Amino acid sequence: MAGRPGRRERPLDPQAGPLERFASKLRALRERAGLTYAEMARVSHFSSTTLSQAAAGHRLPTRDVLLAYVSACGGDIHEWERRWEHLRAEIHASDRRIAVGAHLDAPDDPEATSFVGREDELESCAELLDTFRLVTLTGVGGVGKTRLAKRVAQNAAKRFTGGVYWVELADLSDEHAIADAIAASVGIPIASGQDPVSALSEVLRNRKVLLLLDNCEHLLTGCARTVKDLLARLPHVHVLATSRQPLDIGPEHVLPVKPLAVPRTHLAPDLQGSTSHERATPPAMVLFADRARSASPAFSLTEENWALVAHVCRKLDGLPLALEIAARRLRMVTLEELAERLDRRLPLLGRGGAERTAHARQQTLRALFDWSYELCTEAEREAWQQLALCSGGVLLTDAEHLCGQGPYDGNSQTAEVSDDVFEALAGLVDKSLLTRSTTGTRTRLHMLETVRAYGQERLTESGRAQQALLRHRAWYLGLAARAGTAYGTPDEAGWLRRLRAEHANLRLIVTAPPPSDEPPEMVLRASLGFWLHCLTSANVGEGARWMRTILERHPRPPSAESTVVWCQAVWVACFLLTLHGDYDGAHDLIERGEQAVAGTTSGTGAATPAVGRPDRDELSAAYLQMRGLLALVVGDMEAAVKYTRAALAVGRFSTALLTEPQCVAQLGFAAVLQGDRSRSTSLLEQALEMSEARGDSWHRCYLLWSLAVDHGEAERYETALRFLRRALRHMREIDEHLGEATLGETLAWLLSQRGDPRLATVLLGAVDQAWHPAGAPRLFGFARLTAHRERCDRHARAALGSDQYTRAYQEGQRLGIRQALELALGKGSIGSVSSTSSHE
């Protein structure tokens, strides 16, 4: 047959419907004659492509094509003409004006199942077709381009009075056969040697026609050439194409088709009543539930299984084909077992869950991506494999370094970047294997989890897995290390935002066993970037687990040369464990760290570590300061002051760990908690001036908050509110999630003190959702501050009564911390206070 090299004709199931039964008999006739389609074409007036389409089972061939086919094979022309007439009547194809509608009536067509979602895409595509003559639906394989295109074509049929014709291109391998396939779909016989485009132009010249060209990606050049020619000759013809890659010709308008929306939360909405159920259920879950009921009639979506179905839909990226195959697996496994097996989704979603009448490349998830992989260049395949290791997306600039050539040691200066890498990445975007988004002024690339899984399989097969893994780990660990050195500098805010986007990549690296040939110093040095990142991103508990994992693997310095960086990593662990509420664990680590510090070099002797690394005095100051912080949190004010003053007395501070302003701030906050107004304000203002001079964004946020607490304790509420507004403005600059929760707690207390219990309760509802997921005790465990919150809560309950309190609290939960803060401080007022002196 005239198919792709090495590919056989799509299998037919005679039980699937009349079209396939008819096509099966035509194939049997050709096989008995022992002819190829090329041999048949030589004795007829039709091309081999047109003849093969007659037996593809997609649509009823024209009478002329059928008679030419049968005659070439030596069959009974009269018998076959009778069968053709009977089939024509059976499938109601007498009106060929809407060819796509006739095809969609066929039992094997996926449109026989329900059409889910896509309201926005249907509307957008309809508008584009009204305005433009070539619209291409693009998207990754299995995303539902064909189904969407057919629904668009059905909806548009009345506007195209000359007909709507569906042209399946998946089985074509010859770019010059595209016009033949279009002619066969329209029903135009092409004589031997006749130009099919000319024949189409002659027949369609005055007809308003919509051509649906399906699966163009493997014949892009031929499709582009044919479509451009037809549009130039036929002013009333419109083309709707589906492809994993745009045609890239002038008149084309591209509409990306994305996966179906998945649930953002595992919590089930109220499912009582079908109307509310439909509104509350994301389209991916509606599709899965519908197909699951078909496979297992006892299945229904309930509040009890909502979380599991949501998990399945998220794990499969909302990809319709994957969801449909997975749903069929419920004939074999329970929903729980399906969810458990999704880490091996490629074999799970294999042929056993396929639709038998689907095209071979649509029958399994692996076959779906085999097709895409074949269409990639070698450079694109290598980039796909390398980026499959990335979790949560990757910046374009990072992707270029990751996909570069040669060894990489974590130093961005040594990474080789070439134009070829950029072109490979652009090719993956064009082929819908990568999608892009914009973060600020930067491009970020994203890969569906199913696409990642396939890329990882191919990476393993390539023999490059170890090299790619080392490169991936070195790059992101290098980023974290550089972020750590930016603490307390004007670059700090930018690096915090930078690591925020890479949290999933860092999680993947830290939690996975390291390769045997990776230097241990690499992850120890990277931990310098973890302490502030995990705090500001509200991942304190996770950060504490990361550091426990790292130190379990490296319970002592791996070598004498790595002692300093190991001590820094232990300090980071102490900080995160303290904020996590693991005070015993933090205390034990402080002692271990101090013992190691005692063995390092002091002063500035010849054995002092390299520039940028702290010596023994600096490390000693850092650990004394950490003892002071731990004592401050647990409420031992005497020890907090003693250790913090001892740290200041050392007089040397590491730029990568907490700093001199933090020591002064600890003394000031201790004075606040002791009620020593004579010292608290001046110390906090001194620390604030030092942080502002350094350009330290994060520390400034908490110093402004500390001053708000200080003035609130003194019942200077308006001044306290001004400090909170300033603090919030800086926290928004670095997107400090836990900082916003901390401000919300203090603002609720101030509002309660000023006599606004309802607004205070709204804030309490909002902030309560932030602390537990972050893995940090409320207000980091400061007993005096949590006492403020408890009094605020009691006053609000007493003032509002149970019902009003519950309504206000739930309103805060719905709003979330950011909107609740805006409501409480007044819309438009955030940031309205100028950066005036801290003495206001």
Image (tube, rainbow, N blue to C red):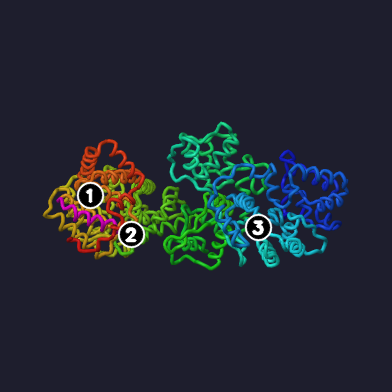
Q: Quadrant of the C terminus?
A: bottom left
Mark 3: which secondary structure? loop
Query: Which amino acid type is marked by label 2?
Result: Glu
Callout 1: SS: helix
Foreground mark, 1 or 2, reads: 2
Looking at the rendered structure, the kind of residue marked 3 is Cys
**Circle 2 residue:** 733
Label 2 sits on a secondary structure element that is helix
- For residue 822, above or below residue 583: below
Q: Residue at the spot x=16%, y=53% of the render?
A: 716
Instruction: Give the residue at mark 3.
Output: 216
**Where does the image place residue 738, in percent across and percent down from the top left?**
31, 50
* Mark 1 to mark 2 CA distance (whole Å): 30 Å
Magenta stretch contains residue 287:
no
Is residue 430 shown left or right of residue 216?
A: left
Q: Which residues are magenta?
A: 714-729
Chain-order first, disc 3 or disc 1 = 3
The reply to whether the magenta stretch includes residue 723 is yes
Magenta highlight: main SS: helix
Q: Label 1: which residue?
A: 627
**Label whose residue precedes the other's in the sequence (2 or 3):** 3
The spot of residue 470 in percent (x, y) is 48, 56
- Say if mark 2 contacts mark 3, CB within 8 Å: no
Residue at left offset 24%, top offset 65%: 693
Q: Pick whichever, 353 or 6, lies toward us.
A: 353
Of residues 802 and 700, the one drawn nearer to the viewer in this rendering:
802
